[in-house]
Image (cartoon, coloured by chain):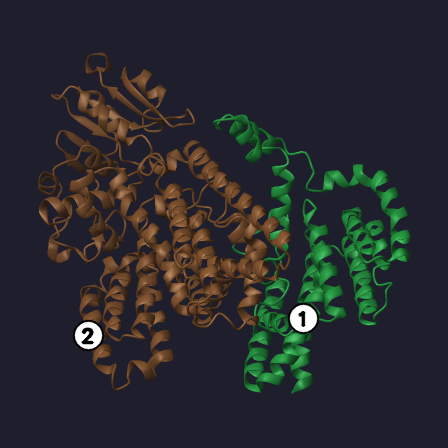
Amino acid sequence: MKKYFPYLILILFILIGIVVRFYKLGSAPAGLYLDEAGQGYSAYSILKTGKDEFGMPFPVAFRSFNDFKTPVYIYLIVPLIPVFGLNAFTIRLPSFIFSILTLPLLYFLIIRLMGKSKQSVSIALLSVLFLAISPWHTLFGRTNFECNVALFFLLFGYFLFYKGLQKPVWFIFSALIFAIALPAYHSERILVPLIIIFLFSNYRKILFSKNNLRYTLIAIFLGGLLVYPTFRILTTPGFMARVSALNIFSKGGWTYPLKQFFSLYFYYLSPKSLFFLGDSGPRSSFPEISVFYFWQLPLYLYGLWLLFKVKYLGDLKKFLILFLIISPIPAAMTSDPFSSIRSLPLVIPITILMAVATDNIYVHLKSLWSRRLSLALFIMIIFWSVAKLFSSAIILNEYQRAQYWDYGWQQIAETIKTLDPNLPIVVDNARTGSYIFLAVFLKTDPTEYQKNNFEVTPENYYTDMKKNDVKVIGRIITRPIDWKPDTHKQQYLIGDSLAISYEQIEKNHLLLIREVFFPDGSPAFRIVKTNPNLTK
Amino acid sequence: MNKISLGVVLFAIFLWPISLVLTNDLITLIPFFLSLVIVCLSIYLIYRNSDTWYFPMVLLPLIDIHFFPLLIFLFTYSVFQRNKKATLFFILPVILIIFLTWKNFQPHSIFIFDYESKQAILRNINLYPNPIYARVFQNKLNIPIAKFENNFLSLIDPNNYFFGSHPHELVDNQNLIKIPFVALIFLMYGLYFLKINDFWLRTTILSLFFVLTLSFMDHFDKFDLVLWPVFTIIIFRGYIALQKKSKLISFLLICSLFAVTLIEYLTLLK
């Protein structure tokens, strides 16, 4: 029984992680953000036609609104659609699954790096618990963000490499997993090569020893083969779109960008950003909570001190230093003050550092009563943290951030189904790519969509960046409303509260069919019917 | 070579007070520099292993009321240390100051009345399923706590000193670059090689008291100058340790420190 006790605790902590991430998955955050809808429909299109909505068969980077999306997440949605349907739940499900899989992976990674001992088990379990209730990791486990899936593959590749040090056949699997991690998210395009350089320089003698050379070469070959399609499009405008748009070094000069890079880099490790401000983006944060809990601040500082002072961490020390140094690099190259999406791998070393600190504090408590008291206090803090997370992620986020999650389009789609089928519908797209929401929620046939909305040939898919803003979905056309001609024809007009104001309704004698409200009561969208007889 | 590199470190270290002089009216800076002199005196007394090192601190709230919480920390510390002389020395001014100056201190502190935050809490309370749950996470105590957290974390944020609080510049703060960012390497190296002895223990406690005191202020702009001596000592410690470790790295760092410092001075003069 004693042998299995750590596994029982591990299962309990994973269950906490599941509850925190699965509760209202798909409905909280309410709505489905533009990028989520885009990825969902690309997956749906691949499933139905083998091509994305632009007609490109099995792309290695998915053409999207203003940039190209990474492919791994989209391909992970594809097999889930026949089971769960095309909806917010399915689109967010891969994030949830890989977020949960990261928990046991972290446990086994720490054990492998430290070697099995009472201390490594306790550090591994504490790390899993901290990650299970982490606001940072939970946010990306509940929503469609590729960074979470990429993080799993990054850690898995690292874990398999260390497994390979004992049984070299695992080097091959490690290479394959790293090859999946590389295109899984933009940050990993920088992190994976840096990690591989680190592993090669540290273990070159083992990798190129007589017994292992065969496996190393196979691993390099197969990994290279899997990455080859990504390399082929490396210099295309499509692949570079994101890099050139965000990179602080692409704007010219060196002195200022270099100073800015360092200021951003250190900001990612600063307690202020980690424990108080967090990410200011309304979708990449929860209200009133940072990426870590404030009570974890002393653990972080103590953990940092322990990292350089204690000797029992083994290979975990190398892992922690490596990840602490490299994780902020991709994010610090962009001008956003603190991007929790781009710097997600940083959650792992910081979580482990806090676990190391907690374990060290507990070990130093000598008397039984002080241990019991601190354990009781710790359990209370964990309960408080889960309640705080629920307060931020479910209660406040729903109320304050619904508009940023493009809330309301599902209601619009449901209303469209009830409207007079003989009348055309104009949906305003001045502020958002409204067509993609309708395509998802109306489950538009991708074949028909591809036929009516040609944008680019497959040959120019990665190179031609021109966009077609007007989209046709059956009788629906998405374009900016043009008041004069549009009100002289009998049809439905759909737009947000800015596009169709009460003044416009009164002035143009429009009939208000439905108004959709955000959870805070402010108007989100309006559906109106024109009245050409009165307008004329 | 040593004299030149020492000069470069001094050139970099003095950026903080000089930048204040260059960007402010000199008369307004008198209280801040007076406070700095008192802190330097205290650190000197710590260095001389004198038990009276916190006596000069009692003058700080007289220079500026913002330093009032410092007395409470020092008083608590003296009680904890069973230092009867200090306890008796502090107890009277503390009691007197608490009663006499609270009204003056409150409008300049984190306890200032904040109508907007109060309204936000009232709005949020209605969203919770039960009142107890709402009260735990939405209460008026959260307002000063959040302000305290913000100040405290800004004060231990390296970006506040090395990058002018960039990328999250502070409101109502000059956001000056206080120390050229290359010196951050010396600082980290100095921290790593700190030996735990009576001097560092007391200096750390003193720094912590200052950080806590400044965290109670509504805006700690310019007041954080009291931390300058501690930064100076650690950076010098790091510089000496690094010079012993590698002459080449030390030389390269001194060169880049000079270049970056020069740019910072030129930016200030512009």
Q: Is residue A348 above or below residue A36?
A: below
On the image, the x and y values in percent for residue B167 come to 52, 55
Asked if residue B57 lies left or right of residue A284, the reply is: right
SS assignment at label 2: helix
**Residue beneath the point at 13% across and 22% down:** A421
Q: Nearer the viewer, mark 2 or mark 1?
A: 2
Q: Which residue is mark 1?
A: B234
On the image, the x and y values in percent for residue A502 come to 36, 19
Q: Is residue B190 above or below residue A386?
A: below
Q: Amino acid at mark 2?
A: Phe
- Name the outermost residue toward the top: A534
**Residue beneath the point at 38% across and 79% down:** A202
Q: Chain of mark 2?
A: A
Camera-side residue: B146 or A518?
A: B146
Q: Amino acid at mark 1?
A: Ile
**Residue beneath the point at 57% across and 34% down:** B136
SS assignment at label 1: helix
Asked if residue A364 lies left or right of residue A465, the reply is: right
Asked if residue A354 lies left or right of residue A515, the reply is: right
- Image mark for residue A221: 2
On the image, the x and y values in percent for residue A406 come to 33, 36
- Image mark for residue B207: none
Position of the N terminus of chain A, as image quadrant, is bottom left
Marks 2 and 1, how far apart at CA: 50 Å
Q: Colour of chain A?
A: brown
Q: Colour of chain B?
A: green
Position of the C terminus of chain A, as image quadrant, is top left
| Neighbourhood count class around disc 1 (C-alpha, 10 Å): few under 14, some 14–19, many 20 upward | many
For the question of whether residue B229 can be seen, the reply is no
Q: Chain of mark 1?
A: B
Q: Quadrant of residue A300?
A: bottom right
